[in-house]
Image (cartoon, rainbow, N blue to C red):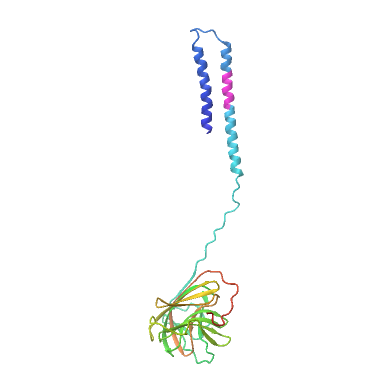
Amino acid sequence: MKSYGNTVIYKFIWLFVIVVFVSGCGQSATPTPNVSATGKMLSLNATMAALDVTVQAHQAAQTEAARATATSTPLPTSTPTQTATPGPTIIQDDFSSDTGRWVECGQCKIEGGVMKMGPYPIAIDGGGYMAICKDCGKPQDYKMGVDATFLDGYSDRGFGLLLREQNGSYVDIEITTWQVYGAWLFNNDNNLWYTLIDDGWKTTGNLHPGAQTNRLETEIVSDGGKSTINIRINGQLVTSTTMDAITGRVGLVVGLHSLGIAFDNFYFEGYPLNQPKDNPTPSGPTG
């Protein structure tokens, strides 16, 4: 824009010069010096010089205006800090060694690449026996799985995954050698068991009978104050049920005394979700 404006001005000046020159050529071959013509030429030179000064001043003014515009735009006072989304907590344990992960288990022994629980001595309180995963924390939503094998004792009793534990009350899912499974809540205050699945124990052909190894898995997802428990056995979804959306410790469980189980290939994936403010202890059926 600035270059185009200067060109137009200079074109006008040189057009004026040419007109003056052509007018001069129309006189005699030996013209008499014309003082007035010299005065015009001097005036033209002065005009051109003044024009140069004007153009330079205009350019300087535009440059200053551009600088003022640039500096008048406020710059960010600080760069926003990018907060990385926390990833899930992932734990895998093949029980090749004792890492101190499993706590509060009176009859646990890691040997031969498995963790053995039980058999526990006879007791009358009716509760089960837990091995708490210390590294897993107190999650609300997560995935968890383990390989479980019956070793000895009463074969009609359950064993499996501990889903929630608070102050001795807990929720678990159990399988047996009789090809049945269940989801249960044990209330430590009254030593009573409550089923989370209609009819209590349910039969499934997905379970291998007897002393064969079975893979038991669960995924827990919460919404609207309730947690949905999806139960998989040997890779197949067998049922879903619900419980209150609360946090609690997780791990492994043997349902009653006089039962020995071997666990292997434990997996845990905890989701970093906000936990509810009200976190009551499990105390009874949740529907």
Residue 193: x %, y % from top left: 52, 86
Q: Magenta includes 80?
A: no
What predominant SS class does the magenta segment belong to? helix
Residue 236: x %, y % from top left: 40, 76
Q: Nearer the viewer, residue 47 or 191?
A: 191
User: Is 59 left or right of 26, judged from the image as shown?
Assistant: right
Residue 55: x %, y % from top left: 57, 29
Q: Which region is colored magenta?
A: 43-52
Q: Magenta includes 51?
A: yes
Label tally: 0
Q: Is residue 135 above or below residue 261?
A: above
Q: Is residue 73 above or below residue 218?
A: above
Tell me what residue is drawn at x 52 percent, y 27 percent: 8
Residue 12: x %, y % from top left: 52, 23
